[in-house]
Amino acid sequence: MKHASAVAEQQSSPNSLDNGNKESVIGLKDVAFRDSERRGNSEHNNEITPGELHIFGLGGEYWKTFQVYEASPGEWKTSSPIEFPPGVVGLRCIVGQDGRKDGQIMHLGYSSWKDDTPEGDTVVGKPGRISCAQLRLPMSCKSVEIATPKYPTHLQEQLARCEILTEEFKRTGNLANISEAISIRWRMVEATPEDDANLAEMLNNLAMSFLDRFGHVDRPAAFNNLGNSYQICFERTGHLPNIENAILALTNAVHLTPEGDADLPSRLNNLGSSFLCRFKRLGNLADAAEAISLQTRAASLTPEGHAALPSQLMNLATSFVSLFEVTKDASDLSEAISLQTCAVDLTPALHADLPSWLNNLGISLLMHFWCLGNMSDIAEAIARQNQAVDLAPEGHAHLPTLRTNLGNSYMQCFDQTNNPLDGKDGISNLVQALQHTPEMHAELPPRHMNLAFAWYRYFTSSHRSDHLDTAISNYKSAATCTSGSPRRKLEGAICWAGLLDNFYPCSTSVLTAFRAALDLLTSLAGLEQTVQHRFTMVGKLLSIPGEAAAAALRLERPDKALEWLEQGRCLVWGQQSKLRTPLDALQAHDTALAERIVFISRHLKNAGSSRQHSGTNKSWEGKVSLEHEALKHSQLASEWDLLLTKVRDLPGFEHFLQPLQCSTILRHLPESGPVVVLNTHGDRCDAMVLLAGLYDPLRVKLPDFSLAKARQYRQSIIPEDCEASERAASRYGRKHGAGTGGIYFILHSLWTEVVKPILDMLNLARVDDPSKVPLTRIWWCPTGPLSFLPLHAAGVYEGT
């Protein structure tokens, strides 16, 4: 917790005002902290984000906690009044941030209030300040009268003890504390005459304590049900905050369930399943490890013969399968098959889940075939999955999934046998699976993908164009679904663009497909991911902008090629670095909206850079804190998207924080020379020359250069297996993988194949005397492997 430690000396009177059976005490309300430096300042780094106000000195040896919420950027307020009991002369306050205990100490001091008692309803208190280094937070509040029951002295001591116990229970969850508080309140009620004016208040307090205790007993079940509901919602919509909420709720459920409780295994299993869902979405191995750890513990706590044991084993097997799909470690798959076989053997013949479990076993057997190539694995997989389909009644919720997997197994068999019957059976099952999938279901993209691949595989055997067109149509449907995982939709868009590029290279539909792929790639590299994850994910897909640009150049659209290369360049850091440009225009149009953009961007940057992941060795409190952090990150990302949509709906802000359009790039070119953008893909290489005053890029074909040559030259200069220090040395000429002769050859080749054709097109001749003819400056903007080649040094050197 980032703490602001504060001493608040209340020198005004501890006196109370007698109003019959009620007495009024002095208190505070509308306590507010303001950071004037942060408001509207995106570069302010000395920030705190209070979440709670802990006050010592309100009676007893413990503190009371008051929630603080952010009313606006840089301003926080308490959500309830703060009462001063009689006799209070000093308070100590701690302002805390999100339950974390790191950070720096700050002191809060404020002057006493002018009067001992308020005049009228309220009196505005004198502002105090929280200060730390250069940080100064003004504080304002109101002094008010708060009416409280009037108790005899001996009862006041018991009431104070109850308050302390209740606060301790809320802080720690220790049932002994609230039970003792109930016992004290019960004795007080029994000792109070029926005509006592305080009896109603005492009965109310006793009832609230009972609610606290029994509410606590039911909380694990409530958290478990809430988490399961969020997970189901995520599985249907693919909306990431749903699974973050599920993990948070289920983590609380497990944390609050005592050891030995009969419900603990099922809650551990549910939490493991949610971690697995997030692993499938984000691909973080730590989530898979956490899922396996939780589900292993759940299975170990479930006694033999228990009806839930097959389910526990099957869920654990599913986690091992998901891990195998990423790591390709055969031992994970073998463990999964062993667990699934055991679960199926333990399941009664008419059990409702048997079809799904047979299906899962079939999938694992199919993957086992991929590892070892044993045809008997495919045969057994098809047999198990046919059995699953036969056992599932028509209309069963899992029937589309069962048919999908059976269809995929038939297509794998078709790949081996080339038997048309296997292909037809596979396509038939995949079509039925898609027909029974509801609209907006998260599985629509992968099911379109499965059917598309089946038709394409069938096309490679039949050579019928209608089979190819059906495959392309299904890939397009996968890419353009409004629901489902962005990762799977991106895979569909890449396949859609790839087939069009290969079989219909002159169709303008190629540009539509690549446009969809780039938009999905940008979405997948969005701010809901950590920076490290964006680098990892984007690194695997960096070829997409180059492929799209090559297609655009082939179709005589250099403007699109330029825009897409710029979009690819901005994938990881562009979203946040572009905020460094002035927001003056938006500030002038809507100050509050501009401040909120800066506020969310700053918090997303911090969350994306520092977010950790839950680990099996962390305490439950630590895991809850991490899941709070993950949920907050997702919520910030969702709000960021909504804010961008809101800004882009404003006149004149349609392209706010989007990659630059070609026309914008061309309007801001240097006057002193051309900018040359180079792109290479496959067996082609093109240059786009940008000149100030021209409305379109000039395209230069470079037929003698290719992607293969770029990689060859790069490998010659900087071998892939050399150490980082050697790479650094080679850049400065201290060590060259190619040797001196090799370097001259590469520089000569770059001159003849790349640089000279561009200079010839620009009519730039050699200048012998720069003092008489001014030299033209050229800005080289290479992409891909060309970025590692010394274009600026290209030339014909003596001896080559």
Image: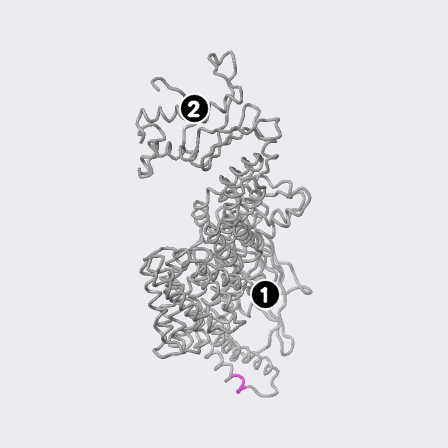
Q: Quadrant of residue 482?
A: bottom right
The structure residue drawn at horizontal position 42% and vertical position 47%, both measured from the top left corner, is 536
Residue 190: say if magenta.
Answer: yes
Q: Amino acid at mark 2?
A: Trp
Category of crowding for the residue at label 1, using alpha-carbon neighbours closer than 10 angstroms: few (below 14), some (14–19), many (at least 20): few
How far across and how far down the image is residue 453, in percent?
Answer: 48, 54
Q: Amino acid at mark 1?
A: Ser
Confirm whether residue 9 shows in the render: no
Q: How is the image coloured?
A: one colour
Q: What span is colored magenta in the figure?
A: 187-191
**Helix, strand or loop for the magenta stretch, by majority:** helix
Of 545 and 774, nearer the camera is 545
Give whichever of discs 2 and 1 has the lower sequence position: 1
Q: In the figure, 286 relative to 769: above or below?
A: below
How far across and how far down the image is residue 675, in percent?
Answer: 53, 28
Residue 322: say if magenta.
Answer: no
Q: Secondary structure at mark 2?
A: helix
Q: Quadrant of residue 342?
A: bottom left
- The residue carrying mark 2 is 751
Q: In the figure, 743 relative to 624: above or below?
A: above
- The residue carrying mark 1 is 80
Q: Secondary structure at mark 1?
A: loop
